[in-house]
Amino acid sequence: MNWLRIICALIAISIYLYLIFQTSRFSKEFKEAINDDRSISKRFVHRWDRKYSKEAILLIIGSIFGIIAIFLS
């Protein structure tokens, strides 16, 4: 059971690291979009709106794997 806990924890950590990377990339692109024309273009909003739904699902999956890893300990 110990190996299963480690695998679940690694999956949860990797998902959370990916989400942190995406958040920093969003922040960088958001600042660039604001600096370019002092408003947010519809293309920018549409692109990140699609990515947000994927990231919300990944957040839920990462939380489930984290909870499983806690319960297996």
Image: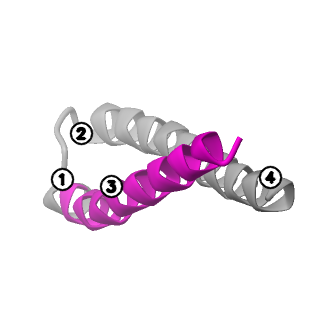
Residue occupying image coordinates x 52% and y 45%? 67
Cα distance between the residues tagged 4 and 2? 47 Å
Q: Please give the range of residues in magenta.
A: 45-73
Q: Which amino acid does the dot numbered 3 rest on?
A: Ala
The residue carrying mark 2 is 37
The residue carrying mark 1 is 41
Cα distance between the residues tagged 4 and 1? 43 Å
Q: Which amino acid does the dot numbered 2 rest on?
A: Asp
The residue carrying mark 3 is 56
Residue occupying image coordinates x 55% and y 55%? 65
Helix, strand or loop at disc 3? helix
Cα distance between the residues tagged 1 and 3? 22 Å
Q: Bin the neighbour count of mark 4 within 10 Å (Cα to Cα): few under 14, some 14-19, many 20 and up.
A: some
Residue 23 image position (x, y, % from top left): 47, 41
Taking depth in this image into account, of 10 and 72 the one nearest to the observer is 72
Residue occupying image coordinates x 51% and y 53%? 62
Q: Which label sits in the foreground, 2 or 1?
A: 1
Q: Which mark is residue 6?
A: 4
Helix, strand or loop at disc 1? loop
Badge 1 or badge 3: first in the primary sequence = 1
Q: Predominant secondary structure in magenta? A: helix
Q: Bin the neighbour count of mark 2 within 10 Å (Cα to Cα): few under 14, some 14-19, many 20 and up.
A: few
Badge 4 or badge 1: first in the primary sequence = 4
Q: Quadrant of residue 21?
A: top right
Residue 69 image position (x, y, % from top left): 64, 48
